[in-house]
Image: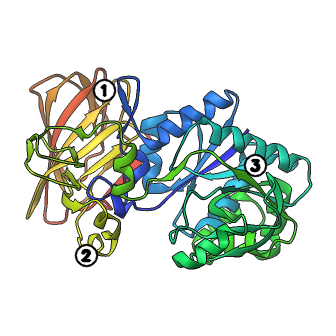
Amino acid sequence: MNIILLSGGSGKRLWPLSNDVRSKQFIKLFKNGDEYESMVQRVYRQITTVDSDAKITIATSNSQASAIKNQLGEKTSICVEPCRRDTFPAIVLAATYLHDELGMSVDEAVVVCPVDPYVDNTYYEAVRKLQELTETGAANLTLMGIEPTYPSEKYGYIIPATGENVSRVKEFKEKPDIETAKKYLAQCALWNAGIFAFKISYLIEKAHSMLDFEDYRDLFNKYDTLTKISFDYAVVEKEESIQVLRYRGDWKDVGTWNMMAEVMADQTKGKAIMDETCVNTNVVNELNIPILCMGCKNLIVAASGDGILISDKERSGYMKPYVEKIETEARYAEKSWGTYTVMDVQPGSKTIKLSMRAGEHLTYHMHNYREEVWTVVAGKGKAIVDGREQFLRTGDVIVIAAGCKHTVEAFTNLDIIEVQLGDEISVSDKIKFTLM
């Protein structure tokens, strides 16, 4: 299989565990054996179980690329958007990346899927069937529609010409009210879950008719000038040669805490205690302090360094406009080298814990406006400051003046408390260099 996984969004509906850096697909609430895994790890495992030779490319934003590398290593290709421009530009960029950078033939069929459905392996068996249908060339676009289990207001609908397993698409419908949804179901309608397949030649030709670019690198450089538009509006709803494959298996959209609570591995995660009177309540606690729940009914309790949520489960689906009013910097992020946790912020200072995996290293970089004080609290490694090496062990302290180039390499798992000092402390105050 050739699969493009779309990994975007800020995940505000799973605040405070999700933010612009760590969207819902990176939160480890599922299990593989005794180990917790995230949605992106689960999806990768499922795809490669169905097809061990699957070629997977993740289309994502720059802010999420490090989390993907942290959780999947070098297992997949990553096509990074320079900025967010909705799904049509993202998919065109990924398709040209496959052709121009990875050398995939224009005759190859590619399936585009969201990275965050909760499904069993039959879903990816259907994805493989979707690619096979596309390879026959019977239609320019082949969609996979989800057979509805109830009349929903949350999804758009695909109206097929027939109720057969594969059918020509008759029309598309926007999200309806309940009564209209019932009428759609009587027409064998399917939920539109944003799953579609095409040959690379089809999409590149379509893209050149709509966008002015030469190849992947030219498109990448012009990306910020592109109009924001979804793939559905730009391509799918205008295509006449289009068919749909009916998927009858289990499928859940876990975009809200209410839905996540139905599928997460454990009722509680982290330091959490519930008394015997609690009913239908889930607690996820990332703080190093305990949460005690007593008499709680139908609640979600979620706590992280970004904030604390206490919500009725049904009501949690309506939290996005309220979360948008909370303006805080993300306090936890997964990096390609480990994790970054903000411990304290004061005027003129910020305290951070860096947890690096053995064998990883930071980029060689410099800050113009802040001084840093590093204290090694666990592990061994090596620091390089303005070209001078210093071996590190627990208890060592290094002071790095503003303007000094520096990096650190972890020999073992390495924990460092970093105190940033200065009147202007900003993530943009970073200049990278090549270490000679």
The quadrant of the image that shows the C terminus is: top left
Question: How is the rendered protein coloured?
Answer: rainbow
| Distance Cα–Cα, label 1 vs label 2 | 39 Å
Q: Which residue is mark 2?
A: 325
Position of residue 47 relative to residue 168, above or below, is above
Q: Which residue is mark 3?
A: 110
Residue flagged by tag 3: what amino acid is it?
A: Val
Q: Is residue 312 left or right of residue 421?
A: right
| Distance Cα–Cα, label 3 vs label 2 | 39 Å
Taking depth in this image into account, of 59 and 253 the one nearest to the observer is 253
Q: Position of residue 367 (x, y in %)?
A: 27, 54
Residue at the (30%, 26%) spot, across then down = 410
Label drawn at residue 410? 1
N-terminal of the pair, mark 3 or mark 2, is 3
Residue flagged by tag 1: what amino acid is it?
A: Ala
Q: Residues within 10 Å of mark 1 (few under 14, many from 20)?
A: many
User: Could you say whether the residue bearing mark 3 is in a helix, strand or loop?
Assistant: strand
The quadrant of the image that shows the N terminus is: top right
N-terminal of the pair, mark 1 or mark 3, is 3
Position of residue 189 relative to residue 308, above or below, is below
Q: Is residue 380 left or right of residue 33?
A: left
Residue at the (30%, 73%) spot, across then down = 324
Q: Is residue 298 left or right of residue 21?
A: left
Taking depth in this image into account, of 295 and 47 the one nearest to the observer is 295
